[in-house]
Amino acid sequence: MASVPSLASTVDQRIADALSAALPEAGAADVLLRRSDRADFQANGILALAKKLKGNPRDLAARVAGALSAPEVIADVEVSGPGFLNVTVADRAIVETLAARLADERLGVPPSPDAGTTVIDYAQPNVAKEMHVGHLRSAVIGAAVVEILEFMGEKVVRRHHIGDWGTQFGMLVQYLIEHPNELDRSAGQSTGSGASAAGEAAGEAAMSNLNRLYKASRTLFDSDEEFKARARDRVVALQAGDPETLALWQRFVDESKVYFYSVFGKLDMEIHDEDIVGESGYNHMLTETCRLLEESGVAVRSEGALCVFFDDVKGPDGKQVPLIVQKSNGGFGYAASDLSAVRDRVGNLGATTLLYVVDVRQSLHFRMVFETARRAGWLSDDVKTVQLAFGTILGKDGKPFKTREGETVRLEDLLDEAVERATAVVREKAEKAGLGEREIEENGRYVGIGAVKYADLSTSAVRDYKFDLDQMVSLSGDTSVYLQYAYARIQSILRRAEGTAAPVPHPEVALAPAERALGLHADRFGETLAEVAENYEPHKLAAYLYQLASLFTAFYDQCPVLKADTPEQVENRLFLCAITARTLEKGLALLGIRAPERL
Ligand code: ARG
């Protein structure tokens, strides 16, 4: 494992050296290196420096340029505009840097210097309920962020804060007591991947059972006062930890997990049992959480409820809207388990960052939870709290996503349709790519699921986006299919170049403009990832990869690879193909998207 300094940082360093040699009076000045349309890089820092030194910026820039002696890295430097330095990197430096990247299993990407422990709360569906598109977003974005953070050296603890507690379980358990055989189902297990057909069938059976039970118990609850009373008593028994009640509640949880695993399996995503710590997992802490809040005065009783107030959180009537930690009937709500989870994640799991991948509509809740936890002393200044808030998935018409009949869209239907469309796209090209039926089906899944994930990850999370399958599986444009095809095309070129097992770089060969552009962009992978990890912005990784694939397309159009002029040039271009492929594959993997070898 060897980190490779990016060309930007090498150039930056060389200019800084020249600057202190030419202008020792400047001290440690920032050269402010930027990417530029005019040259490979532009250094802008001399302008500010000239003000400080009361000198002519163009003269100072010329002195710095004159002091540069790094021909192996910088091929050309010229003073431009009011006193910028335009830098052209040596072709040799591009190839050598990329060669070092290709030789490293991490592509030379250095781990983050200030890695800590992030507890990430994502993929949190609700027990006994169907998953919806919002749960899809949390799972897809969360999984990508997990991969990216781990790659950058962060310790990541996953928490799936499923909704597995609350008054509705009184109703469900009571119904099951009165209709004991209703949850029986022959197939299925509660753990393991649902990627198999059996897993999917079990998942569907589980959900349809739960749905039926939910509807039936709801109907009874709404129509039968006596049942309602028994259901209410059942909530009390559940909260008091009555073993029979808990055992039945557990069956709902297990049954739901069969369904969750089947959907996550379809999404080609791994979820582990030990990371599923739902609301019920904090049950034993709730009383103490409330006591601590009340004793410290952070929370106060108001009309019987335990509340936390905020100066700036007011309703339309101008009255403060509190965070309710305990209801007046003694019941604990969503906020109590979230506050207890903060205590657990910081106190027991050692989190330095608490990250929540949750719908933007819950932003106020999290703001109040974080603020309450800070007031209570459960969050020191060393612990960062972030809600990675995401927007809504809209239908093609720009309205919240519904079926033609106006019902919420079932997640599995949506994934199935994506795979179906993608399989059709793959099939069209299958003959040319030499794919058999098994590969067509497998690629159809990778392309379809990749398309769904990419659509979700390629726009900034907080923005709403339109779910448009036609656009998502299109071969041209900013789609995962386009990236996957670029990867497969490169692999096919590399396969055709028999005899070059490991493509050999030739730093002495001059590069064409399209080769330079591709090479310079490939070199930015590490910098891009650092930025993406810093601000939890997978869409910037998607944009980076799309540009990489676009630059590859331009390179491929302009620079014959196997038919290049000299054998060295052929090898050098194969080498550029190889680094592009490795970068694409790694980047896609971080987004949770597979890159088939043939497509
Ligand atoms: N289960 C919740 C929902 O479906 C999301 C949970 C978010 N996480 C949390 N710690 N509150 O809306």
Image: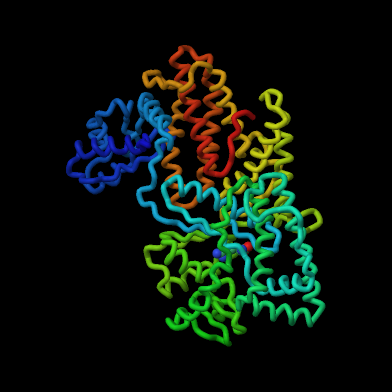
Task: Tell me which corner region of the image, top left, top right, bottom left or bottom right, holds residue 12.
Answer: top left
Q: Can see residue 33?
A: yes
Q: Is residue 523 left or right of residue 58?
A: right
The color scheme shown is rainbow
Residue most extreme to the left = 25
Image quadrant where one finds the N terminus? top left
Q: How many marks?
A: 0
Q: Is residue 170 left or right of residue 546?
A: right
Tell me the residue at 53%/85% (across/down): 301
Tell me the residue at 58%/87% (across/down): 303
Tell me the residue at 76%/55% (across/down): 186
- Front position in the image: 558 or 263: 263
Image quadrant where one finds the C terminus? top right
Q: Is residue 484 above or below residue 368?
A: above
Q: Position of residue 169 (x, y in %)?
A: 68, 71
Q: Is residue 572 left or right of residue 484?
A: left
Q: Is residue 9 above or below residue 298?
A: above
Q: Position of residue 327 (x, y in %)?
A: 59, 81
Q: Position of residue 138 (x, y in %)?
A: 59, 55
